[in-house]
Amino acid sequence: MSIALITGASSGIGREFARQLKERGDIEEFWLIARRRERMEVLAEELGIRARIICADLCTEEGICAVRTALESERPQIRVLINAAGFGRFGAHDQISERDTVRMIDLNVKALVLITHMALPYMEKGGRIIEMGSGSCFTPLPNFNVYASSKAFVLHYTKALQYEIKKYGVRATAFCPGYVHTEFLDAAGTDKAVNRPKKTKPLLSVEKVVRGCLRASEKGRTMYVTNWYTKMQHVLFKLLPDRILTTLWMGMQIEADTEKVSENENKD
């Protein structure tokens, strides 16, 4: 039985991957992994085929163990692994809580690597892995530092992994989109008390970027960068020094509303 294992399946890009894989008709069962059970139940009903729901917070040891136990118990034949779970926050190092900083690293890096390593022994020849990178991974980004750095790790990890797993007939693709129209931007924060971009457009269609990524994965591409805007950024990041790119990025920033910060401090 061909299985698609998808983290971050309760919303956004993860949910869209499930929908489009169902349309393609080569997946017989979905393993949906996320924190919000009700949303996954709705998705499972929409898909209309066998689905296993694993309600887990992958930032915790308990969440990781839940996935490990399910894999060791069922020993499934995994056709597609999609690590779409991710978390980000805008803001300087002193504007983001330690908890959020650690969660970005734990989910975007640690969980992604552990889930990949757990799933690989159960992947069949011809299997595909899609790791959630970002258009932010190509250069240092102040006020988005930890998130962008975690995605730079994902890109390098995926590129190297591709060479390691080639002998098993499995392919890995780093998915590097720009700003996509999902819940991520709301979660990343538009709080006036933190430094953040002036705007996050152009927003990309989640349906379009997922469709493009699946095509790129089928072709065996190691990296998929979406739309002309993000592709242009990728090229510029290769040609220009980091200091120039960082200066340009900082010119797009809105400084924190210090009055709001002071008000918040007075309320505590």
Image: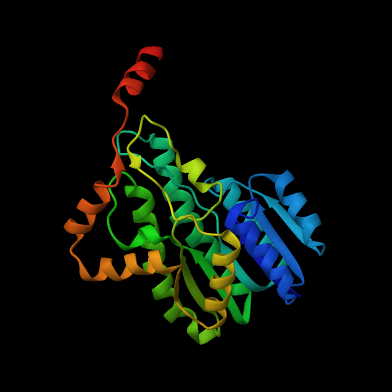
Question: Residue at point 49% right, 80% down?
Answer: 165
Q: Is residue 36 above or below residue 123?
A: above
- The answer to whether residue 229 is above or below residue 142 is below
Q: Residue at x 36, y 54 (%)?
A: 148
Q: Position of residue 213 (x, y in %)?
A: 54, 71
Colour option used: rainbow
Percent x, y for residue 189?
45, 38
Which quarter of the rendered picture does the N terminus lie within? Answer: bottom right
**Quadrant where the C terminus is found in the figure:** top left
Q: Residue at the spot x=64%, y=55% of the render? A: 9
**105, 238: nearer the viewer:** 238
| Residue 243 locus on image (x, y percent) | 17, 56
Does residue 237 lie above or below 62 as drawn? below
Q: Is residue 141 shown left or right of residue 113?
A: left
**Image-based side of 87 in relation to 97, left or right:** right
x and y, in percent, of residue 239 in the image: 22, 71
Quarter assignment of residue 37: top right
State whether residue 68 appears in this view: no
Which of the 4 image quadrants contains residue 137?
bottom left
For the image, the number of numbered tags is 0
Decide if residue 60 is in sight here: yes
